[in-house]
């Protein structure tokens, strides 16, 4: 589980680039930051929900300033999950770089996140059951579309009060076959270094990450994986 440190409104900034840059980027981050005190490393899993015409994906692909994202997130490898999994249903709204996130902690059966096909009515029933506790309006037509997993290391930069993470081994390994044609798992040859704070910009030392070959700008794991899935690419 991630520590619950962020306030409701947080600015995110991302650097993204080729996976081979990770050792150098990690060295830069670790020279400036301390490992997260509680959860320094782990696997992040997210089931992304979308409408049948992929409105959330198209908002990202079209570069819309207003975006909505719904996902169910949990942490850990499938084969190590307990019978009841601590998960978080998240609804994220974004205006530019600022975001408004509602996050509800839930106890979810392992079978739902690790074994149930996305075409199953169980997912729609699950989402509908949570709507009363979500403070952000959520369309009733949303369905699970794909699962994205990746490895993450987490850090804390005390000088800039920034949460820093490094993500790699990003893959989409399960899809809703009612909406997306079956294909081999998608694996991105990419890594992401993300900064979250109240100030709207990464700390000055982060310029070294750009010099290491990463680009400063928007990067959506869901958007990148969906683009490949919809085009039938691995």
Image: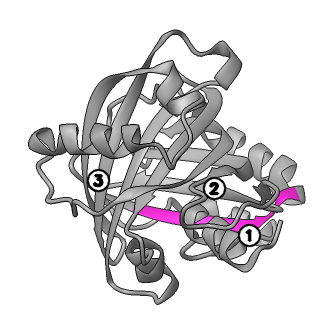
Q: Position of residue 148 (x, y in %)?
A: 61, 49
Is residue 181 on the magenta stretch? no
Residue located at (70% from left, 18% from top): 79
**Main SS, magenta residues:** strand
Q: Is residue 207 above or below residue 184?
A: below
Residue highlighted by disc 3: 91
Between circles 1 and 3, the one closer to the viewer is: 3
Nearest to the observer: residue 152 or residue 130: 130
Between circles 3 and 2, the one closer to the viewer is: 3
Q: Is residue 67 left or right of residue 138?
A: right
Dot 3 lies on which element?
strand
Question: Pointer 1 and pointer 3: residues touching (CB < 8 Å)?
Answer: no
Q: Position of residue 26 (x, y in %)?
A: 76, 45
Identify the mark nearer the N-term, 3 or 2.
3
Query: Counting other residues with Cα less than 10 Å from the Cα at mark 1, is it few (<14), some (14-19), or many (20 or more)?
Result: many
Nearest to the observer: residue 60 or residue 97: 60
Identify the mark nearer the N-term, 2 or 1.
2
- Magenta residues span 12-19
Cα–Cα span, label 2 and label 1: 9 Å
Q: Position of residue 99 (x, y in %)?
A: 29, 63
Residue highlighted by disc 1: 214
Residue 182 makes an appearance in the image: yes
Identify the mark nearer the N-term, 1 or 3.
3
Dot 1 lies on which element?
loop
Name the mark on residue 193.
2
For the C terminus, the image quarter is bottom right
Q: Position of residue 65 (x, y in %)?
A: 33, 84
Question: Pointer 3 and pointer 2: residues touching (CB < 8 Å)?
Answer: no
């Amino acid at each position: 589980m991630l520590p619950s440190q962020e306030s409701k409104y947080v600015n995110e900034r991302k650097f993204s680039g080729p996976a081979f840059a990770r050792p150098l980027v990690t060295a830069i981050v670790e020279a400036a930051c301390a490992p997260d005190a509680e959860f320094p490393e782990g696997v992040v899993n997210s089931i992304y929900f979308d409408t049948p015409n992929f409105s959330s994906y198209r908002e990202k692909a079209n570069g819309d300033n207003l975006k909505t994202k719904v996902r169910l997130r949990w942490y850990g490898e499938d084969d190590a999950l307990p019978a009841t999994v601590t998960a978080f249903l998240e609804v994220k709204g974004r205006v530019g770089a600022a975001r408004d996130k509602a996050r509800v902690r839930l106890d979810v059966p392992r079978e739902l996140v690790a074994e149930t096909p996305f075409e199953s009515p169980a997912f729609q029933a699950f989402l509908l059951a949570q709507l009363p506790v979500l403070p952000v309006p959520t369309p009733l037509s949303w369905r699970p579309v794909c699962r994205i997993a990746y490895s993450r290391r987490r850090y804390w930069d005390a000088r800039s009060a920034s949460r820093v993470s490094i993500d790699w081994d990003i893959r989409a390994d399960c899809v809703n076959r009612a909406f997306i044609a079956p294909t081999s798992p998608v694996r991105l040859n990419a890594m992401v270094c993300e900064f979250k704070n109240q100030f709207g910009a990464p700390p000055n030392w982060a310029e070294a990450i750009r010099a290491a070959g990463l680009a400063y700008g928007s990067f959506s794991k869901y958007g990148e994986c969906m683009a490949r899935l919809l085009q039938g690419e691995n």
